[in-house]
Image (tube, rainbow, N blue to C red):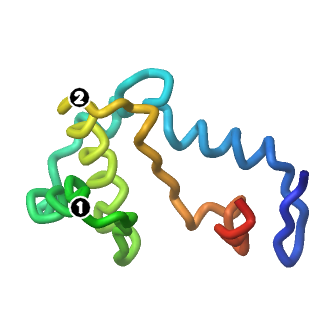
Amino acid sequence: MLYTSRSSVIPVHKIIDRLQFENPWWVTKEIPTLYKDMSKRLYFDLFYPFVLETDIRRSVVLMGPRRVGKTVMMFHTIDKLINEGINPQRIFFIGIDNPIYVQLSLQEY
């Protein structure tokens, strides 16, 4: 099956390949070294409890301007979850600004 955006057709295998690339811990069971070496972001301790909250069935979305450390904070969150015993294959990250996802509806999945 193919998913379409306004200007192109994206094969499902390309989307799956991208998701596997963005979530390497599914296989390696750890975040990339690049992120491990970076310092924790200022708001990490305020953000992390929202991730741990399981009484409310919801996704956690981290938004903000470019280049402020959102991705670093997400990877540090993923690292902490893995270190606390969460199965890495149950952790899903998607950077929605990637061109492969632009104009794709979540309802299509």
- Describe residue 14's horizontal placement relative to residue 78 as left or right: right
Q: Is residue 109 positioned above or below 91 on the image?
A: below
Say whether residue 5 is left or right of residue 95: right
Which amino acid type corresponds to the residue marked 2 in the rendered image?
Gly
Q: Quadrant of residue 3?
A: bottom right
Image quadrant where residue 80 sits: top left
Q: Residue at x 32, y 46 (%)?
A: 75
Please name the residue shown 35% across and 27% down the image.
Answer: 30
Identify the residue at the far top of this view.
28
* CA distance for labels 1 and 2: 19 Å
To which residue does mark 2 refer?
85
Please state if 84 lies on the left or on the right of 27 as rendered. Answer: left
User: What is the total number of numbered labels drawn onto the structure image?
Assistant: 2
In the rendered image, residue 92, in percent from the top left (x then y), is placed at 46, 47
N-term-proximal mark, 1 vs 2? 1
> Can you give x and y, in whole percent of width and height, for residue 23 in the image?
50, 39
Front-most of 55 and 47?
A: 55
Quarter of the rendering containing residue 36? top left
Q: Residue at x 53, y 43 (%)?
A: 22
Where is residue 17 shown, x and y percent of the image? Answer: 70, 39
Q: Is residue 6 left or right of residue 93?
A: right
Callout in the foreground (1, 2): 1
- Residue at mark 1: 55
- Which mark is drawn over residue 32? none
The secondary element bearing badge 1 is classed as loop
Query: Is residue 8 depicted above or below 80 in this figure?
Result: below
Considering every residue shown, the one lying at the far front of the view is 55
Q: Residue at x 51, y 55 (%)?
A: 94
How dense is the environment of label 2, judged by Cα within 10 Å: few (below 14), some, or many (20 and up)?
A: few
Q: Secondary structure at mark 2?
A: loop
Q: Estimate the x, y position of residue 104 in percent, counting from the top left.
A: 72, 69
